[in-house]
Amino acid sequence: MKPTWWRGRFGVLGEAPASVVQAVQGFLGPPLFTEGWLAGRPVMPAEKAAACYARAVRTWGRANIHSDVDVEHFNRLAQQLIDAADALPLFAGRRAQPGPGDDPVGAAMQRVHVLREHRGACHLAAVPLCGPTARAAMVINLGVEQATRYGRQGPHPVAATLIPRRQRAEQLTDELQAPLYATLTDRQRAEFAELVSALTTSLTP
């Protein structure tokens, strides 16, 4: 991963020590994360990197989301969720970033990323409560080879007994998010689910 990725995604936290940012992201291996975060400092200030990251997200959205997706309605519902959500750290930083008023497609992709960070924060809280370590969760989710690539040094296949715990962590993540989605009406939730499905299935390879 390029230094600009580390700075871009986590730059909304400001010029924080690597150990603080590592605690917020949780899953990538600490040595890899620290190296990437520190390598990005001479390249670009955190605030500027975060703005560039958001701009790249919007650009990608414009290039990949099909024109028949009702992004205007998606944006209304997504923003309602974003406004109602608790201020979890990385999510709160992403939420505070300005979005474009004249680019609904790019704004939709930016809001997808904001909501992604909310779920990510809930999942980071859920995993240790259910038993597997962050390393074990990475191995279960990605396999040993990919977990190594993402900085988990010397990962081994995990015990089969940990797999249900990781599944429970996914369930708990859903439960932690349920009050947020309860702020939508039944009809709005159904519409939002349809829009998310349309948006994600419209993405070109």
Image (cartoon, helix red, strand yellow):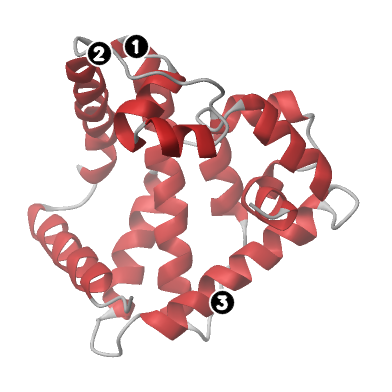
Asked if residue 30 is positioned above or below residue 113 in the image, the reply reads above
**For the residue labelled by badge 2, is the local secondary structure a helix, a strand or a loop?**
helix
Residue 26 appears in the picture as rendered: yes
As drawn, 20 above or below 89:
above
Task: Tell which tag, 1 or 3, sits nearer the viewer.
Answer: 1
- Residue 49 in the image, given as x and y percentages of width and height: 74, 59
Q: Which mark is residue 129?
A: 1
* Residue at the (19%, 28%) spot, across then down: 171
Q: Secondary structure at mark 1?
A: helix
Q: Earlier in the sequence, mark 1 or mark 2?
A: 1
Q: Secondary structure at mark 3?
A: loop
Three-letter amino acid code at the position of disc 2: Leu
The amino acid pointed to by label 1 is Leu
Which is closer to the viewer, label 1 or label 2?
A: 2
What residue appears at the point 32 percent right and 9 percent down from the top-left corner? 131
Please provide percent x and percent y for residue 194: 14, 66
How many residues crowd around disc 3 within 10 Å: few (fewer than 14), some, or many (20 or more)? some
Q: Which residue is mark 3?
A: 100
Q: Which mark is residue 162?
A: 2
The disc labelled 3 sits on which kind of residue? Pro
